[in-house]
């Protein structure tokens, strides 16, 4: 099984500042036949289900603000919130869908400093 | 509008069974693989099971293999999870999630999630 490890477990960022979350997979999730990274990011606010933010490691889902961006390839990925807003307080999860079983990172809690 | 509505959760004693349902609407249900993902109280997301559009491909997490059975009824636009021999560690909010692919358990991210149904396992 592929293990997904996020860092940090939590971070506190001032409003308007940048938040960076890292995700590392124990094996590459880059599919050589199409050069796509099978990695997505979800946002979960308290009392709500997860919401898809990013797929293919860097493609923003429709309607997601452009302050959210994803990057990385192979085994190392990053979710960046360029200018943190109050409504971005949530837990963020990375997710590999390259192989079965699909696996999520343990989550990173983002708070306002 | 895509909607996934889970039901069937509740309080159950250890060792007993429960069947969860997920009613889907707003998309062609038989064009997509579907999954169950759970979240224990205060914990992260754990994939439980998934199946392809025609149920030809099915997979389970090791933690539920042999105890849980995922199924679907495309005529009823419904997904199910039969949970037997429930344990305390199965207590969680169970989400139904739609994949973006049709035939594979992997290779697809989850673009829509239901609100979840809570399963409490306690004597």
Image (spheres, rainbow, N blue to C red):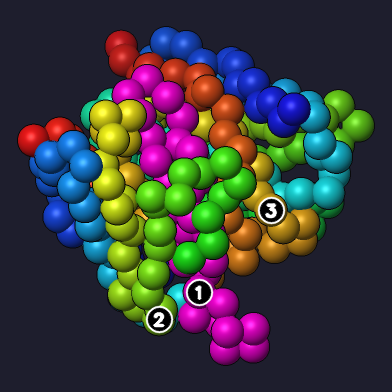
Q: Are marks 1 and 2 on the same chain?
A: yes
Q: Indicate the chain on which mark 2 is placed.
A: A
Q: Indicate the chain on which mark 3 is placed.
A: B
The residue at the far front in this view is A16
Q: Nearer the viewer, residue B29 or A80?
A: A80
Q: Nearer the viewer, residue B27 or B79?
A: B27
Q: What span is colored magenta in the figure?
A: A30-57
**What residue did someone put label 3 on?**
B100
Q: Quadrant of the C terminus of chain B?
A: top left
Q: Is residue A48 magenta?
A: yes
Q: Which mark is residue B103?
A: none
Please identify the quarter of the rendering in which residue B35 is found.
Answer: top right
Q: Position of residue B33 (x, y in %)?
A: 72, 50
Q: Which mark is residue A74?
A: 2
Q: CA distance from mark 1 to mark 2?
A: 7 Å
Element under label 3?
loop
- Left or right side of A41 for A25: left
Q: Is residue B65 magenta?
A: no
**Circles 1, 2 touching at the beta carbon (< 8 Å):** yes
**What residue did someone put label 1 on?**
A37
């Amino acid at each position: 099984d592929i293990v997904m490890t996020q860092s940090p477990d939590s971070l506190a960022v001032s409003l308007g500042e940048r938040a960076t979350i890292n995700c590392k997979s124990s094996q590459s999730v880059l599919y050589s036949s199409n050069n796509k990274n099978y990695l997505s990011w979800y946002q979960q606010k308290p009392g709500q289900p997860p919401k898809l933010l990013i797929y293919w490691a860097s493609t923003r889902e429709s309607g997601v603000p452009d302050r959210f961006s994803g990057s990385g390839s192979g085994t190392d990925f990053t979710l960046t919130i360029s200018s943190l807003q109050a409504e971005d307080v949530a837990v963020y999860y990375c997710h590999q869908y390259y192989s079965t079983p699909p696996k999520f990172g343990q989550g990173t809690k983002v708070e306002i400093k | 509008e895509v909607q996934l509505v889970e039901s069937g959760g509740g309080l159950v004693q250890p060792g007993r069974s429960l069947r969860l349902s997920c009613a889907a609407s707003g998309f062609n249900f038989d064009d997509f693989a579907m999954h169950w993902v759970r979240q224990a109280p205060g914990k992260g997301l754990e994939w439980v099971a998934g199946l392809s559009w025609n149920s030809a491909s099915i997979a389970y997490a090791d933690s539920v293999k042999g105890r849980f059975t995922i199924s679907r009824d495309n005529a009823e636009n419904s997904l199910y999870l039969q949970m037997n021999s429930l344990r305390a560690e199965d207590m969680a909010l169970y989400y139904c999630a739609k994949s973006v692919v049709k035939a594979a358990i992997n290779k697809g991210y989850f673009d829509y999630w239901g609100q979840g149904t809570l399963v409490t396992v306690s004597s």
